[in-house]
Amino acid sequence: MPHLLQLNFALAAYLTGLIWTVQLVHYPSFAQVAPEKFVVFHRQHSTRMGWIVMVPMVLELGLAAWLAWAGQALGDAVWWSLALVLLIWAATFFISVPFHNRLAQGYNYIAIDGLVRTNWIRTLAWTVRLFLLGTLLW
């Protein structure tokens, strides 16, 4: 089980670092893209980020579920860890994806601002999960 916990921690560390970069650098930069170039920019962003984010997120979901099931001796923390992953997935598909769908139609400052503001849910959830797993490893 130590390896399972380490794998969960490694994925959480990767995704936490990525989401902080997205939150503080990448999403705010959307507002700087010229409106006439935004559709192409956003399409490229979505394609490229899909590979960087979705494969690790799917692995994280599976490993978090496995850890919750196999790591019951670690206490409630493994269930909280899984709950945070489920929160991240819900925020991704019910909040972030709809904003991205609006942005796929073209530059929309209100949608960009909404994406940046609501992305804090995922940013904080991944950060809490990383610290939670780090505590378990400690």
Image (cartoon, rainbow, N blue to C red):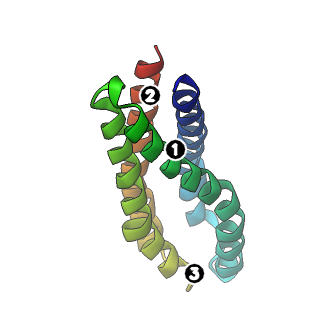
Q: Identify the residue at image location x=45%, y=37%.
A: 67
Whether 85 is drawn above or below 97: the answer is above
> Helix, strand, or loop for circle 2?
helix
Whether 76 is drawn above or below 111: the answer is above
Task: Give 66 or 12, whichever is nearer the viewer.
Answer: 66
* Residue position for label 3: 104
* Residue position for label 2: 133
Q: Position of residue 137 (x, y in %)?
A: 48, 19
* Residue position for label 1: 63
Task: Give 32 or 94, whichever is nearer the viewer.
Answer: 94
Whether 22 is drawn above or below 35: the answer is above
Q: Amino acid at mark 3?
A: Ala
Query: 82 left or right of 22?
Result: left
> Helix, strand, or loop for circle 3?
loop
Q: Identify the residue at image location x=37%, y=44%.
A: 82
Q: Amino acid at mark 1?
A: Leu
Say whether disc 3 or disc 2 marks the residue closer to the N-terminus: 3
How far apart in space, not on screen, are marks 3 and 2 (Cα)? 35 Å
> Helix, strand, or loop for circle 1?
helix
Q: Residues within 10 Å of mark 2 (few under 14, many from 20)?
A: many
Query: 115 left or right of 25?
Result: left
Of labels 3 and 2, the one closer to you: 2
Q: Amino acid at mark 2?
A: Leu
Say whether disc 1 or disc 2 marks the residue closer to the N-terminus: 1
Q: Position of residue 7 (x, y in %)?
A: 59, 34
